[in-house]
C-alpha cells in the first residue's frame, strides 16, 4: 500500500509527537492548528520516565531542551511541616535512558516541532478546522475549503472540534467531575532564593515542593533550565467561581485572568512562605480555570478518524500524566500504523489502539479523581509513580501487534 496521507488536528504535545513517529514510518503527515504560534501557549508539567523514554525514541532530549530532573520532593502540610519525601532518578544509568522531569511546555513544543519539520512533517498553522466529514475523511476549513486524507488524528485537546464527529457529544463531554479549579503562575527561582522567607526552602537542589490542606494544594517545581518556578494551586471550584464562568471554554482557557486577592484569601491559613510566592509573581500573571476530565467514552475512533490525548481522554493534573498519556498514545498509534499497513486493516488497528490504551488511561483517570477528592496521596504516590515509570509503550504495542497478527495468520 502507498504511504498514508494523514492529517493531525492540534499541534500541542501529542500531535507533534505522533507526527514525528508517523512521518518516520514513511507516511505523509500534515499538522494543523488554529493558532499561528502554538509555542507560546501553556505552562509546565511533569514528564515521567515512561513518556521521557518515548520522547528519546523520537529524538527529543528533554533535559537538553530546558527540563529539570525531578530528583527529590517534599510534601508538606499547610504549616510547612514535612509529611512525606519523594526521590526519583536514583539509578544514574536508568535515568540516562529515561528520567522523571519537569518540562516547560513552550520549550518541549519547540523541540518536538523542530524534529517534526526535520522529519518531513508539513505544518499548517493559523488554519481553523470548522468540522470533519468522518465518512469521507475530510477536514472542513473555516474558509469553506475541504481537505481529503486517508486518516484524521484528533489531537486538539479537551475542547476538541473533532470529537463530536466521533461520539455523541450530547452524552459524552468534559466536565468538572471533582469540582476543582487551579491557579497557575510562574516566578523567578533566583529571586525566590534571595527572598528572606523562601531562601531556606528553595535551594539549588529544590525539585518539588507542595503544601496541602482540605482539598487545597500549592505545588512548586522548577523549569526552564532551573531558572523559573512553575506554581499550580488547586482548590474547590466554588472558592474562585467569581473568577471564571463555570464549565465553559473560557473558564478553562490558559489566559483566564484571576486576582491575587482571591488566591490569597483561599490559601490565607497556609504558612507565610507559601503565600510569599503570590507576592513575587507578576501582577498580571495569575490564571485560573476549572479542572475538567471526562468519563470513558464508547469509542476512540469512527471510520478513519481517531482521537488522541485530551481529545479522547482529558485527565485531571493530580495523576501527573496528561501530557505523558498523550505521548504514549502517539507512540502506540504510530507503531500500529507502519509503512506497509493496508487500508482494510485500519479499523482493527484503531480498535487495537483502544484495547492497549484504555485500561492504562482509566487508572490515571481514577488516580487523579481520588487525589482531588482527598485520598491519602503521600502513602500511594511512590507505587503509583513506579507503575507509571515501568511502562514501555513501544514494547507493549509491539507485543500486542505481534499477538494480533499471529491470531490472524
Image (cartoon, helix red, strand yellow):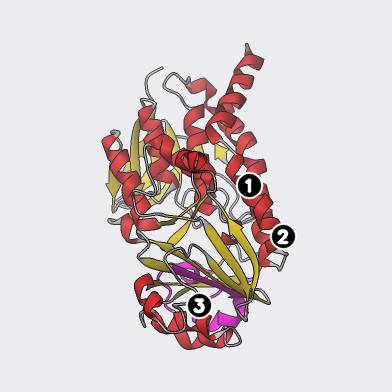
Whether residues under marks 1 and 3 lie with C-beta atoms below 8 angstroms apart, the answer is no
Judging by the rendered image, the residue that carries numbered circle 3 is 244
Residue 235 visible (yes or no):
yes
Residue 68, numbered label: none
Identity of the residue drawn at 35% across and 57% down: 106
The residue nearer to you, when weighing 67 against 324, is 67
Judging by the rendered image, the residue that carries numbered circle 2 is 379
Mark 2 or mark 3, earlier in chain: 3
Residue numbers of the magenta segment:
230-257
Of helix, strand and loop, which one carries label 2? helix
Judging by the rendered image, the residue that carries numbered circle 1 is 386
> Is 238 included in the stretch rendered in magenta?
yes
Residue 133 visible (yes or no):
no
The residue nearer to you, when weighing 339 against 210, is 210
Identity of the residue drawn at 60% across and 63% down: 175
User: In what quadrant of the picture does the C terminus appear?
Assistant: top right
The residue nearer to you, when weighing 25 against 387, is 387
Of helix, strand and loop, which one carries label 3? loop
Residue 224: horizontal and vertical position, in percent? Answer: 35, 60
Q: How far apart in space, not on screen, are marks 2 and 3 (Cα)?
A: 34 Å
> Is 311 included in the stretch rendered in magenta?
no
Classify residue 400 as left or right of residue 306. Answer: right
Is 21 above or below relative to 264?
above
Q: Residues within 10 Å of mark 2 (few under 14, many from 20)?
A: few
Amino acid at each position: 500500500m502507498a504511504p498514508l496521507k494523514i492529517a493531525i488536528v492540534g499541534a500541542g504535545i501529542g500531535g507533534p509527537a505522533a507526527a514525528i513517529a508517523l512521518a518516520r514510518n514513511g507516511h505523509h503527515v500534515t499538522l494543523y492548528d488554529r493558532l499561528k504560534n502554538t509555542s507560546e501557549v501553556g505552562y509546565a508539567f511533569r514528564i515521567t520516565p515512561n513518556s521521557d523514554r518515548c520522547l528519546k525514541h523520537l529524538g527529543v532530549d528533554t533535559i537538553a531542551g530546558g527540563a529539570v530532573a525531578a530528583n527529590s520532593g517534599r510534601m508538606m502540610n499547610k504549616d510547612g511541616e514535612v509529611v512525606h519525601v519523594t526521590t526519583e532518578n536514583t539509578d544514574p544509568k536508568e535515568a540516562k535512558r529515561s528520567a522523571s522531569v519537569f518540562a516547560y511546555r513552550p520549550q518541549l513544543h519547540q523541540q518536538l516541532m523542530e524534529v517534526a519539520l526535520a522529519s518531513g512533517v508539513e505544518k499548517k498553522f493559523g488554519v481553523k478546522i470548522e468540522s470533519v466529514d468522518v465518512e469521507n475523511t475530510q477536514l472542513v476549513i473555516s474558509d469553506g475549503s475541504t481537505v481529503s486524507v486517508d486518516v484524521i488524528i484528533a489531537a486538539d485537546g479537551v475542547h476538541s472540534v473533532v470529537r463530536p464527529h466521533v461520539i455523541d457529544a450530547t452524552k459524552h463531554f468534559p466536565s468538572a467531575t471533582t469540582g476543582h479549579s487551579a491557579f497557575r503562575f510562574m516566578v523567578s527561582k533566583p529571586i525566590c532564593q534571595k527572598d528572606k522567607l523562601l531562601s531556606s526552602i528553595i535551594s539549588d537542589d529544590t525539585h518539588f515542593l507542595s503544601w496541602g490542606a482540605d482539598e487545597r494544594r500549592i505545588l512548586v517545581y522548577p523549569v526552564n533550565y532551573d531558572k523559573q518556578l512553575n506554581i499550580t494551586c488547586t482548590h474547590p471550584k466554588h472558592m474562585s467561581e467569581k473568577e471564571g464562568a463555570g464549565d465553559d471554554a473560557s473558564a478553562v482557557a490558559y489566559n483566564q485572568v484571576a486576582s491575587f486577592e482571591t488566591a490569597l484569601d483561599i490559601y490565607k491559613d497556609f504558612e507565610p512562605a507559601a503565600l510569599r510566592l503570590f507576592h513575587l509573581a507578576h501582577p498580571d500573571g495569575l490564571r485560573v480555570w476549572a479542572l475538567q476530565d471526562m468519563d470513558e467514552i464508547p469509542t476512540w475512533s469512527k471510520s478513519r478518524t481517531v482521537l488522541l490525548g485530551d481529545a479522547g481522554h482529558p485527565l485531571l493534573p493530580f495523576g501527573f500524566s496528561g501530557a505523558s498519556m498523550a505521548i504514549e498514545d502517539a507512540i502506540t498509534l504510530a507503531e500500529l500504523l507502519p509503512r506497509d499497513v493496508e487500508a482494510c486493516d485500519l479499523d482493527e488497528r484503531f480498535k487495537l489502539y483502544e484495547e492497549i490504551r484504555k485500561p492504562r488511561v482509566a487508572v490515571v483517570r481514577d488516580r487523579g479523581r481520588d487525589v482531588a477528592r482527598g485520598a491519602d496521596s503521600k502513602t500511594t504516590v511512590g507505587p503509583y509513580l513506579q507503575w507509571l515509570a515501568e511502562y514501555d509503550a513501544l514494547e507493549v504495542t509491539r507485543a500486542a501487534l505481534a499477538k494480533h497478527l499471529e491470531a490472524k495468520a
